[in-house]
Amino acid sequence: MTSWVDSEFEGSKFKDERLGTRFLKIARSLAERIGDSVPVACQDWASIKAAYRFFSNPNLTENEILSGHFRSTKGRFNETEGPIRVLHDTTEIDYNRNKPLEIGCRRIFSNKKGFYGPQGKEVPRCGLDMHPSLVLTPEGLPLGLSSNIFWNRKKFKNSREIQRKKNYTRIPIAEKESYCWIRGVEASNQLLGSPERLVHIADREGDIYEFFQAVMSKDSHFLGRCKENRRTNSEEIQKIHDVMASGKIKGHYEIQYRDKTGEDVSAQLEIKFERMAIRPSDGLKRKMFPDTEVTVINAKEVGKTKGRREAIDWRLITDLKIESLEEAIEKLQWYALRWRIERYFFILKSGCKVDELKLRTAGALYNVISINCVLAWRIFWMTMINRESESVSPKIALTPTEIKTLDQLKPSKSKAKPVLSDYIIKIAKLGGYIGRALDPPPGNKVIWKGMQRLADIIIGIEFGLKIVGN
């Protein structure tokens, strides 16, 4: 049966053609069994052994696995218009094992101890770091990944000792873990090909001067949240916080959202924005980088309302010029989309369960996680396209067999021609979505459960047809 996997990875390029054939077979198996282990997905011993050999192949890289998906992302990007947001963030995939073997031991959180193994002996935590770049349309629909960088901290295990002996600001960015932010920008700009349309969005971790310079040097734009109170080139006011504190309030904006307990709350924000030039820190940066013209937006909550939460106080920094309150609010709305990459990580870890994989080497884990990254994007895309698009044909996401099966399982009561959102609702109902009149749109969890159950049903149908002989 033809699967969406075939079209998504159509542009994949491998050094050995046999690897490409094996890759598609493994990807189809994992797509049918989202969240299951490699043995469960592959079933028979020959396929399991072939999959483990594929993932452990020293000549195979994660970029080869993702090359087809990157090409598909570029194709979807070319079909869109307007500014495109590229979300960057780093996540940690933790593997608590007594014998980490070749994965690369490290303490994931430097201020926490390792876990305790047999006989109460402390064992170092081990794991991997991943830095993806997720491409979003102006409406927030995920188009796919434009970059994905893996590493473990084995090569950075003595970084704290280096900091004690040398000023950390004087160490070149290429020798730090934070260089992944620049690599993500460069790879995204090169893949998508229209850097002037790209707005690279980062959280406080991405408040790096070299990151700002790398984005602007490629004619693209950045939007992030301030972590550092950087110096300006003004002789009277020295720091960003001082400039914003003395600035005039440009207007107010009310937002509604849910707090950590799920309660609906509203917040009244006072908006300030100022254009200024920030200076690099001392050391090598002063010699290597010029001052940077930026706009800083301060959104501060006035009179905290109900809800168990902290008062909002955001300081956003961007190279884009802002001349009105409407433009400042627009940038706040853009930054609010950054949370979607956190939902992507939730799908990857809770739906695809990449932190429960049992492979023994870092290289093999990179390869199998790369496939799951595309599966997680697929789930996220189906969730969001159901909310953003109302008249899309189901053929762009589902095979004819899947459409016919869903029509039989969940017949439509309406006489209107069904669209993709109708079939996504049917898939969600297979995963436990009730779908009452006042219910919100289905979320990621019911969709990945429904997709898994649909795959099982189709296997049963095909097997039944072979037995009956029709």
Image: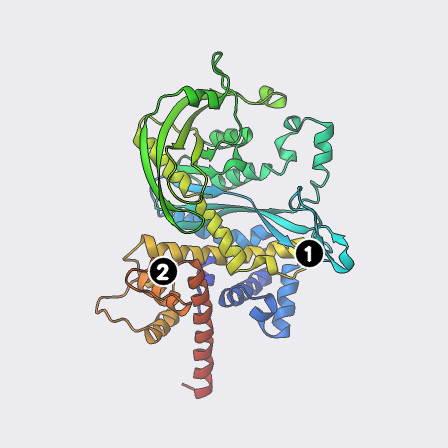
Residue 92 horizontal/vertical position (percent): 59, 48
Q: Residue at x 67, y 56 (%)?
A: 96
- Say above or below: 184 vs 121: above
Left or right: 234, with 411 as reference point: right
Instruction: Identify which residue is drawn at 38% across, 72% down.
Output: 401
Q: Identify the residue position indicated by label 2 in the image.
A: 396
- Residue at the left extreme, as displayed: 415
Q: Which quadrant: the N terminus?
A: bottom left
Q: Nearer the viewer, residue 36 or 433?
A: 433
Looking at the image, the residue that sits furthest to the top is 235
**Disc 2 residue type (three-letter):** Ile
| SS assignment at label 2 | helix
* Label 1 SS: loop
Q: Residue at 46%, 66% (x, y): give it.
A: 449
In the rendered image, which residue does mark 1 sit on? Answer: 361
Judge by depth and name the residue closer to the eye, 25 or 86. 86
Give the image quarter of residue 319: top left
**Amino acid type at image mark 1:** Thr
Q: Quadrant of residue 120?
A: bottom right
Q: Is residue 338 above or below residue 369?
A: above
CB within 8 Å, label 2 to label 1: no
Task: Say left or right for 467 vs 386.
Answer: right
Give residue 219's quadrant in the image: top left
